[in-house]
Image: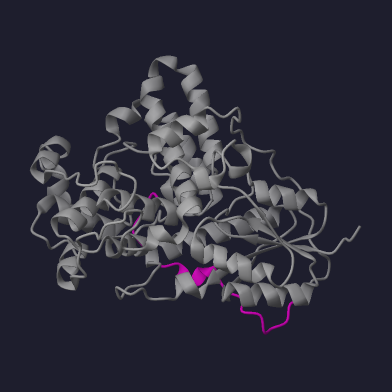
Amino acid sequence: MSNSPIIYWFRNDLRLNDNTAFLKAVETARPIIPVFIIDDLWYDSINSSGFSRTGQKRKQFLAESLLDLKKSLNRLGNTLHIFKGDTVSVINELRKIIRAEKIMAQREFTWEEIEIEKKISAHGSLDLIWGSMLYQPDQIDFPTEKSPFYFTRFKNKVTEQPFIPSPLPTVKNIPAPADLVWPETLPFFNPGQFIQQRKETLFEGGESKGRKRMNEYITAGGPLHYSETRNNLEGENFSSKLGPWLANGSLSPRMFFAELMILKENNPEKAENINPLIQQLIWRDYFRYLFLRYGKKLFTVKGLRKTEPGMHNDLETFERWRKGKTGEPLIDSLMHELEETGFMSNRGRMLVSSYLCKDLKVNWQWGAAWFESALTDYDVCSNYGNWAYQSGRGTDSRVNRRFNLKTQAKKFDPKGEYVSKWL
């Protein structure tokens, strides 16, 4: 049996614990060369609306996550090799230098990532393993092309499965190749270049910080009142705020799920409060299955609908929305918070997306693109899936649903404290 090194290509799975693909690589008992590539496609490019696809806050969170992962690997006798450039070119160059027979990675769901996978596979072996979900496609009894269109049916179908998600064994030993020498021509990158001084924030990247935040949230009893606070605009532990770590894989959704199930078992009287939070994790799966079923359609202006959207490429109106200058106090406050912090509540995201598409009638894709740039917790499937849903281009059965902003403000900001803070 060959003992040639395996290149493990980290993607949106920046952790060592409960990482199915990485564990499979370690189980081969071959030397592992962990790599991460900061692809210019996402981290250097400007989108059609004129702003960076990845804003500073998410770049910094990524850099912190990579440095934390590198420390964890160092403690186990290995390290993380970080490059910047075109992923396919870098992987092909590494394959030649190392003479690696195999590359292993977590499988992704959307078309840009899939195209990269295809190009890498064309040059040699690429083993892709499902990850980042509670219910993986290889653990369910229906094909992805028949995944239910509506969420409730999807939720019922997956929760009927006999599979019960549970965290995997912890990786304890990661063999590294001896005497590895890299040529100077490789595009090494120091992620510290993405890090700037900033105000104190809850969102510091890395697996250790993600697990710390999860434990703090659970210890504080946040899940026990989630159903009561989930629609708040802000507040201490009104939501888990675990999105950034879940998005880049610094935290396993299966691990969070397991903790919630234990909490529910120990507090049966609070099950109705905890269940909506568990349901949010199932929503993550749902959007991934939608992309596996419909592919690139979810990135088109029609989305999953046959009719024209009735929205326009109105740049002036879009810019007023983006900069929080619409004249609607609640909308403007939410947009100011997003730009300053990289975060917005779930209720807030519903309101600003619906307002852009259904009140201002601006192309929903522009809003999704701004969220991609501005959010620290940007996740391609959840972001575009939710934007399609709120704009009537996705799977909402009530495609013309609209929010009354005065009613929403009265209900969720009755004293005007949120608006006063952010306007």
Q: Which residue is drawn at the image coordinates 28% and 65% (left, top)?
A: 366
Height in image: 367 above or below 413?
Answer: below
Q: Quadrant of residue 356?
A: bottom left
Q: Position of residue 109 (x, y in %)?
A: 52, 55
Q: Answer with left or right where residue 408 lies relative to residue 254.
A: left
The x, y position of residue 372, in whole percent, is 37, 61
In the image, is residue 305 above or below residue 188?
A: above
| Residue 167 visible (yes or no) | yes
**Residue at horizontal 56 percent and vertical 60 percent from the top:** 66
Residue 183 in magenta? Answer: yes
Q: Is residue 215 magenta?
A: no
Query: Could you tell me which residue is drawn at 28 percent across and 32 percent down?
Result: 229
Span highlighted in magenta in the image: 182-202
Residue furthest to the right in view is 1
Task: Specify whether residue 423 is in view.
Answer: no
Image quadrant holding the C terminus, namely bottom left
Q: How is the image coloured?
A: one colour
Question: Residue 296 or 70: which is nearer the viewer?
Answer: 296
